[in-house]
Amino acid sequence: MSAPDHHELVIIGGGQAGLSLSWHMHRAGIGHMVLERKEIFHAWKHQRWDSFCLVTPNWQCRLPGYDYAGGDPHGFMVKHEIIEFVEGFAEKFGPPVMEGVAATGLTQTQAGFALQTSAGPFTARQICIATGGYHTPITPRMAERLPKHIVQLHANEYRNPEQLPPGGVLVVGTGQSGCQIAEDLHLAGRKVHLAVGRAPRVSRFYRGRDVVDWLQDMGHYDLPVSEHPMQEGVRDKANHYVTGRDGGRDIDLRKFAREGMALHGHLDAVDGERLAFADDLKENLDQADRVNDRIKDSIDAYIAQQKISAPVESRYVPVWEPSAADTKLDLAAENVTSILWCVGYEPDFSWVHVPVFTGRGLPVHDRGVTAVPGLYFLGLPWLHTWGSGRFAAIARDAAHLASRIVEF
């Protein structure tokens, strides 16, 4: 029996995180292999809806040696443009990727690590797990109580309104995906019911600039986890909802309601075709607005402190208020034929048999470096800063890990 293929470094994951580290390894002349269970950039190609676009401006798209160079730095790339961007990055250096190879088991050895894969065993002196933190779509167990004729999809399966059967649609969850999908359906003329959770919102523009531009100047995106007021708790925080669609705008759920979208509190229970929602719609909407106001307060303070000349802008005034608690929904009576679950993902590192995890199954690390020598993580949300799981800071995170790998 032949010995397993051995590499100095194996990078698991062929998305922007894994290939960013590969770029550094290529530059440093360190032999390595990238394993990707499907194809490179699979999530961008196959797990986004047709109208998907970035919610952060194009100028924040920075991969190693490959910044956005298009003509619309303050715009928001749509799906095909994002795919062209990441594929252009890979073409620049030709990463050594084995596609269609899934990692199924990782253990520590005296010489490094033993890796089991769908293509056979490998050994490596160092391992970087760059698969991100969004692995298993969450579908609440209450979904099992729904009738079989109700079509159920997770956000990563949604492509466009025509994919769904005629009738109303219930969208559960108001993070970035839930709000943008609800808007997509709403603009297509579908009757949308939206179960509103506790996710915060942010304005697209304020006082003459994109809010992201202000926060960048204020140093918000360079704040490390260790200095954040919430400390590691920020890693569990929901993203603020906003959109880059059609040049960028706010997502105002109250405006949608005034236009006919039915808003409910968070989904509490399912009994066949009868659904029950919590009586928290008003509080959830108000809380989202309060977060938005606090962000504007911080921008106002920065403008005053720096003595910046910026146009004055009045604050948001709610355009709609819930008149009464709408806590019940009869799917049949309202002709709701499909439900979209937009309640997030769970990480799955069950194949990693190395003692580096918390009781929740999350890796313990310092900027991606674990306590086990030679084992690293990259691409996790808030690995180091807000931009760690995004284009904004993946190059910086990869450069830091590359320096540690070279020194190992």
Image (cartoon, rainbow, N blue to C red):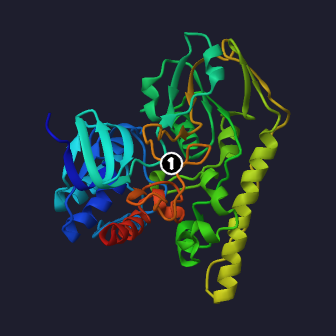
The answer to whether one can see residue 37 in this image is no
The answer to whether one can see residue 218 in this image is yes
Instruction: From this view, report whether residue 270 is shown above or below residue 258.
Output: above
Residue shown at 54%/67% (left/top)? 212
Nearest the camera: 366 or 260?
A: 366
Residue shown at 63%/37% (left/top)? 173
Q: Secondary structure at mark 1?
A: loop
Q: Residues within 10 Å of mark 1 (few under 14, many from 20)?
A: few
Q: Residue furthest left?
A: 2
Quadrant position of the N terminus in the picture: top left
**Image side of residue 202 versus residue 314, left or right:** left
Nearest the camera: 349 or 93?
A: 349
Q: Residue furthest bottom?
A: 307
In the image, what residue type sits under mark 1?
A: Pro
**In this figure, which residue is indicated by the disc labeled 1?**
355
Picture coordinates of residue 114 (x, y %)?
31, 44
Picture coordinates of residue 217 (x, y %)?
54, 78
Quadrant position of the C terminus in the picture: bottom left
Picture coordinates of residue 236 (x, y %)?
63, 51
**Image side of residue 117 versus residue 340, left or right:** left
Picture coordinates of residue 156 (x, y %)?
45, 35
Instruction: From this view, report whether residue 348 is shown above or below residue 25.
Output: above
